[in-house]
Image (cartoon, helix red, strand yellow):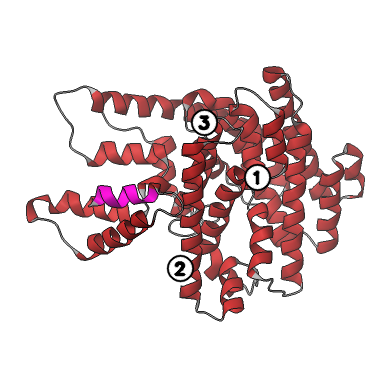
Amino acid sequence: MISLNEASYFGFEGEHLLVEAKAFTKEYLTNNHSKEEDKLIFDDDVKHTLGLALRYRMPKLEARHYIETHPKDVETALPELAMLDFNRAQLMHQQDLHELARWWKDLELSEKLSFARDRLMECLFWGIGTLPKPELSSGRKALTKVFKFITIIDDIYDVYGTIDELELFTNAIERWNINSIDELPDYMKLTFLALYNTVNEIGYEILKQKGFNCIPYLKKTWEDMTKAFLVEAKWLQNSQTPTFEEYLNNGWVSVSGIVALTHVYFFVSPEITPEALRCLRNNHDILRLPSMVFRLSNDLATSEAEIERRETANAISCYAKEKGVTMKDARKHLSKLIDESWTRLNEIQVVNETPFSVDFIEAAMNLARTAQCVYQHGDGHGSPELIKKKIVSLIINPIQL
């Protein structure tokens, strides 16, 4: 029954039988108990399945969970090999962390921007979740840096900058010119120049590896994201509740998925093609759908705190106000939209009529998985104690052989 439930999450649009199977197995697993002799492992598996479907889980965390919770077959060496493989990858992640910590210390932004969240470990968690393969170390480190700047800039727009300052910063990102910093306040000068240098360094690395100047594509995503941030800041200042459609059209951009995945594309794609570049520019579904999962998962986790702070623009409050429904019903609707986004992602992955490589599609899906992991029990990025155990198991503590 657990296997049938897990399989139902791999369905395509219009496969109503799998929708029925999902509902039936969920109800069955929720209401029924196992035989007494299998109860302990059964209950653990049921809780794990109902908490988050296999299709939605981070692969590396799921591998560790399986290794540690299931009986070992002493007739084969596979369990030991799996543990060795996990620990070897973890050592590489620790080396990445050491390099990133030195990079972050040398920037000195933590001391200069005391208002911003210092979330290097959490940003590496996002990087590992999206690009878990050991051979993608350079892409993973670049992505961690990207998430670090996303976090800083998000804090500038959310809690620190005035509207006038935010407009200046947004214009500076759009111009992407070093002379743009002259009109910025000091804390924004530091942020802009550090971001400018980091993105250009990433672009230089891609140019060396693949002979392509990707900086215009990277810059455009930062421009789009900061413009979306500015829209949300103005909603907040004006105590404005947008329509649900207006919110989502802006929100899937402001959540930063397109920034992350555009950087990822240039690291994981064996060939950079004009068709794929056009799809990047036009925000193809392989960018939009994981970003939608990211946005909705974030809002499900953070809406209560945002409502307490009287922030009017989040998916739950927008939908509840527009449709005249309860917050509980609004949350159900968001969960339904997440499932629908995954249904489309399933089809994209299997049919793959896109110009993107298998590795890039998998990375896009991994971004959605990481978002659901981070926000499963609350705002794991804003309140890292919520995912501390996951971070420690993925990056710090090896599996005991």
Q: Identify which amino acid the numbered label 1 is placed on.
A: Ile
Q: Mark 3 points at which residue?
A: 358
Q: Identify which amino acid the numbered label 2 is placed on.
A: Lys
Q: Earlier in the sequence, mark 3 or mark 2?
A: 2
Q: Total of numbered circles in the picture?
A: 3
Between marks 2 and 1, how big is the CA–CA gap? 25 Å
Q: Name the residue under label 1.
A: 258
Q: Identify which amino acid the numbered label 3 is placed on.
A: Val
Q: Residue at x 68, y 39 (%)?
A: 279
SS at badge 1: helix
Question: Where in the figure is residue 236, as x and y percent of width and height?
Answer: 72, 69
Q: Residue at x 50, y 75 (%)?
A: 327
Q: Nearer the viewer, residue 312 or 20?
A: 20
Q: Quadrant of residue 200?
A: top right
Question: Where in the figure is residue 59, as x and y percent of width and height?
Answer: 40, 38
SS at badge 3: helix
Q: Which residue is drawn at 68% across and 55% down?
A: 155
Question: Where in the figure is residue 261, as x and y percent of width and height?
Answer: 62, 39
Q: Main secondary structure of the magenta part?
A: helix
Q: Mark 2 points at which residue?
A: 332
Check if mark 2's residue and mark 1's residue have beta carbons within 8 Å: no
Question: Where in the figure is residue 27, as x and y percent of width and height?
Answer: 27, 64
Q: Quadrant of residue 231?
A: bottom right
Question: Which disc is residue 301 wearing?
Answer: none
Q: In this view, does 46 lie to the left or right of 91?
A: left
Q: Is residue 286 left or right of residue 181?
A: left
Residue 27 higher or lower than 307, as above or below = above
Q: Residues within 10 Å of mark 2 (few under 14, many from 20)?
A: some
Please report the bounds of the magenta region as a residue range. Answer: 2-9
Q: Is residue 141 left or right of residue 64?
A: right
